Image: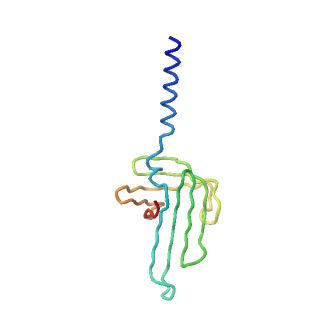
């Protein structure tokens, strides 16, 4: 009886461990590089060049933003999942360094569109750049 209980206990612990190791599908989806680029003319016409790029990689993030070919604003740090349901992922960015994100922690909303392989990050549409 003790042996059966021991085996059952080990089996239950293994199932709990496997469930904890199962990657979140929304987190898996955002891994990689996401880009938004808007060319609205050129420097001579006074139109703006805007470039955003987000990178997510196994608990870390990197963002850069450049407007009108100036010095880019850059931040990097770590993230954790606050909420994940259907096509919505809410991340908490923390251990933030750089000059783009000025609050630590920072809450980031990501709306996922798997069909079009896009993501709205803070309501701005990004396309997958890599992979």
Residue situated in front as seen by the camera: 129 or 97: 129
Q: Which quarter of the picture shows residue 113?
A: bottom left
| Residue for point 54% across, 79% down | 68
Q: Given the current orientation, which residue lies at the most extreme bottom position?
A: 44
Q: Given the current orientation, which residue lies at the most extreme left position?
A: 115
Please determine whether, in this image, residue 113 is positioned above or below residue 50: above
Q: Which quarter of the picture shows residue 39?
A: bottom left
Please determine whether, in this image, residue 9 is positioned above or below residue 89: above
| Residue for point 56% across, 63% down | 63
Residue situated in front as seen by the camera: 10 or 102: 10
Residue 122, x across and y down, in percent: 48, 60
Residue 16, x across and y down, in percent: 50, 31
Q: Which quarter of the picture shows residue 101?
A: bottom right
Q: How many marks?
A: 0
Identify the colour scheme used.
Answer: rainbow
| Residue for point 51% across, 66% down | 53
Residue 78 horizontal side relative to residue 124, left or right: right
Residue 93, x across and y down, in percent: 58, 54
Residue 63 horizontal side relative to residue 126, left or right: right
């Amino acid at each position: 009886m003790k042996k059966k209980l021991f085996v059952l206990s080990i089996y239950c612990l293994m199932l709990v461990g496997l469930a904890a190791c199962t990657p979140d599908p929304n987190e898996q989806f955002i891994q990689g590089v996401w880009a938004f680029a808007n060319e609205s003319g050129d420097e001579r016409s006074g139109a703006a060049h805007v470039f955003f790029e987000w990178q997510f990689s196994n608990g870390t993030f990197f963002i850069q933003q450049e407007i009108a070919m100036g010095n880019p604003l850059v931040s990097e740090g770590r993230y954790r999942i606050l909420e994940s349901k259907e096509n919505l992922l809410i991340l908490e960015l923390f251990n933030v360094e750089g000059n783009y994100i000025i609050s630590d922690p920072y809450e980031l909303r990501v709306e996922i569109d798997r069909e079009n392989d896009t993501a709205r990050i803070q309501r701005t549409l990004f396309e997958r750049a890599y992979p």
